[in-house]
Every structure is written in structure tokens, then in C-alpha cells.
Image (spheres, helix red, strand yellow):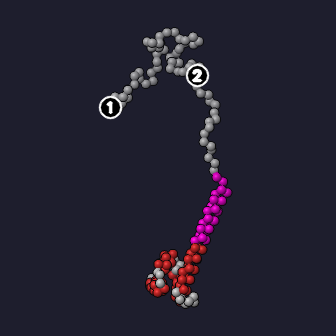
Amino acid sequence: MSSEDGTISCVGGLGNRTPSGGSDGNLGEPPEGTVGWSEDDVGRSSVDHGGQRSGKEQVVDGPPAKRTKSMEYYVRLISESMLERCRNEKDAMTREEREMTELLQILEEDGVPRASELYFIATELLRTATRRAAFKLFTSAEERLAWLQWTWENVKKK
């Protein structure tokens, strides 16, 4: 039972055995087949300990044992990852190369010869994705040429 202060009290005390004479409702002779009850046997499920578990191990269906992966598995995983990364980088490079080719084609259409200094400046400036995006924003040849010259002058100052 619990009391108001949260402590629990027990009737009969801890570790006390039940007396061998029984209680008011259990007075009488020991059952047939028993030699007699002793103080040690009272409270136990059976005198011959037949109810106790045997010492044998029993197989239980449990989760399967964790298997460690082989070195070959990890080498294959790393190799596949590296190949995928190379493919992605190659795709990105070809995409950048196509974009660069398109922008240089626009520059040629704007009247800039391939062997000119402005063409070479454009090949240098258009290496970064940010500058390529900025170059695409301009709609006229004059705007693009002015942007190339202005950007080149500012890059040289740094």
C-alpha cells in the first residue's frame, strides 16, 4: 500500500517465511505423498524442484546473426561510386563544353573573329558558370561586347 508521502509499506516484513502450521483457513495435515513440511520447503513451488528450469540451452528463433561484409564488397562499392562520380563529372564537362561552344558561336555571330583578342578574352571569362549566365542575359551584340570588355578590365585590376 502506498501512503500519502509516497512510501510503500509491506505486511509481514521482508524475508520472513510463512509458518509451517499454515494460516487460519489452512490448518490441517500435510497432503498425502509428502513426508512432512519443513520451514525450508514452505513457500516453494515443489519440494523436488521439478518446477525449476533445466540447465540445457534451448534454440530460440531470434534475429539472424549479423554478417560482416567482405573486403571485396566494400572495394566494389567504392569502385562503383567512383565510376558514377566520373560519369557525372564527364556529363558536366560535356554540358559546359556545349554551353561554351554555343556562347562563342553567338560571339562570332556578333562579328568577333576567332583569332581576335576579344575572342580569346571571352574564352577566358566564360570559363565560370556565373559569367556564362551573365553573358546570356544580354540580348544585343553591343551589350555583350561591352560586358566582355568591362569584365576583363575589372578582372585584370584584381
Q: Of callouts 1 and 2, which one flags the residue occurring earlier in the amino acid sequence?
A: 1
Alpha carbons under labels 1 and 2: distance apart: 41 Å
Residue depicted at 53% across the width and 21% down the height: 44
Give 75 or 19, whichever is nearer the viewer.
75
Q: Residue furthest top?
A: 29
Percent coordinates x, y for residue 146 in the rendering: 45, 86
Give the SS element for disc 1.
loop
Q: Is residue 110 visible from the viewing direction of this image?
A: yes
Q: Residues within 10 Å of mark 2 (few under 14, many from 20)?
A: few
**18 vs 95: above or below:** above
Percent coordinates x, y for residue 61 in the rendering: 62, 37
**Type of amino acid under label 2:** His
The residue identified by callout 1 is 5
Task: Identify the image quadrant of residue 154.
Answer: bottom left
Residue depicted at 56% across the width and 79% down the height: 102
Main SS type for the magenta part? helix
Q: Residue furthest right?
A: 72
Give the SS element for disc 2.
loop
Q: Residues within 10 Å of mark 1 (few under 14, many from 20)?
A: few
Asked if residue 150 is among those painted magenta in the image, a careful observer would answer no
Magenta region = 69-92
The residue identified by callout 2 is 49
Q: Is residue 120 visible from the viewing direction of this image?
A: no
Give 84 or 33, whichever is nearer the viewer.
84
**Placement of the N terminus among the 4 image quadrants:** top left
Percent coordinates x, y for residue 78 in the rendering: 62, 61
**Type of amino acid under label 1:** Asp
Do the residues under discs 1 and 2 have CB atoms within 8 angstroms?
A: no
